[in-house]
Amino acid sequence: MFGVFGIIIIGILGYLSIGILAPEEYTGIISEEIEVPERFIWTYLTEIDSLPAKRKDIEKVEMLGLNELNLEKWREYTDSKGFVEMEFMEKVPDRRVIVKMSRSSFGMTGKWTYEFTPLNNEKTKLTVKEESTAERFIPRAMLTIGGRDSYLINQIQIIKDVYASESTKTEE
């Protein structure tokens, strides 16, 4: 009996230790050539009000007006009953979008830069850079165990999946 309890305690302590010891700040970059036109990437990243229809992890989007750069601010309500407050920091049509997470219910903030370069009519080189801070140690443990770059990888996959889904609807 003590053996199972001891293993559980060691597991919990190990998990908490990972969160405490992992660095708060993270910078990562990922780049991939994808079969998605740059116009679609631009539209996907900038049409915020349509995110709940395209991403199952976002239940609702509330537009919060404009920031000091005269660019949109919004709050995303997640399927885990949390929220993130986002805002555009830069928008260069069909080339680059910079998004800032100014606040979240799970103690994370950051900036994501999306740069896309057309390679041909249907192929684009997409580079995503993340500069984030996870202040709370439990989310930091989750991010570290899951791989700090998992969000970057997931972002590119979501864009490919949404494009594939939209393309299928267009063909029908």
Image (cartoon, helix red, strand yellow):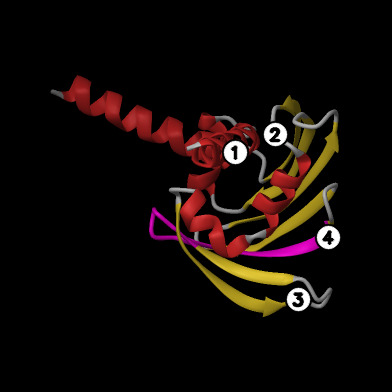
Residue 124 figure quarter = top right
Residue visible at 71% across and 44% down in the picture: 41
> Residue most toward the front?
172
Residue type, numbered disc 3: Asn
Q: CA distance from mark 1 to mark 4?
A: 23 Å
Query: Which badge, 3 or 4, is on the more N-terminal residue?
Result: 3
**Which residues, given as a range, are shown in magenta?**
77-91
Query: Which residue is identified by label 4?
Result: 90
Considering the numbered disc 1 on the image, is that residue within a helix, a strand or a loop? Answer: helix
* 134 sits left or right of 41 in the view: left
- Does 120 lie within the magenta span? no
Residue type, numbered disc 1: Tyr
Please give the label number shown on residue 163.
1
Query: Residue 75: image x %, image y %?
Result: 56, 68
Local crowd size for mark 3, using a 10 Å CA cut-off: few (<14), some (14–19), many (≥20): few
**Circles 1 and 4: CB atoms closer than 8 Å:** no
Query: Which residue is identified by label 2?
Result: 36
Query: Residue 147: image x %, image y %?
Result: 58, 30
The nearer-to-camera label among 2 and 4 is 2
Residue type, numbered disc 4: Glu
Query: Which badge, 2 or 4, is on the more N-terminal residue?
Result: 2
**Circles 3 and 4: CB atoms closer than 8 Å:** no
Residue visible at 22% across and 28% down in the picture: 5
Query: Which badge, 2 or 3, is on the more N-terminal residue?
Result: 2
Q: Quadrant of the N terminus?
A: top left
Q: Main secondary structure of the magenta part?
A: strand
**Circles 1 and 2: CB atoms closer than 8 Å:** yes
The nearer-to-camera label among 2 and 3 is 2
Local crowd size for mark 1, using a 10 Å CA cut-off: few (<14), some (14–19), many (≥20): some
Considering the numbered disc 3 on the image, is that residue within a helix, a strand or a loop? Answer: loop
Q: CA distance from mark 1 to mark 3?
A: 29 Å
Residue type, numbered disc 2: Val
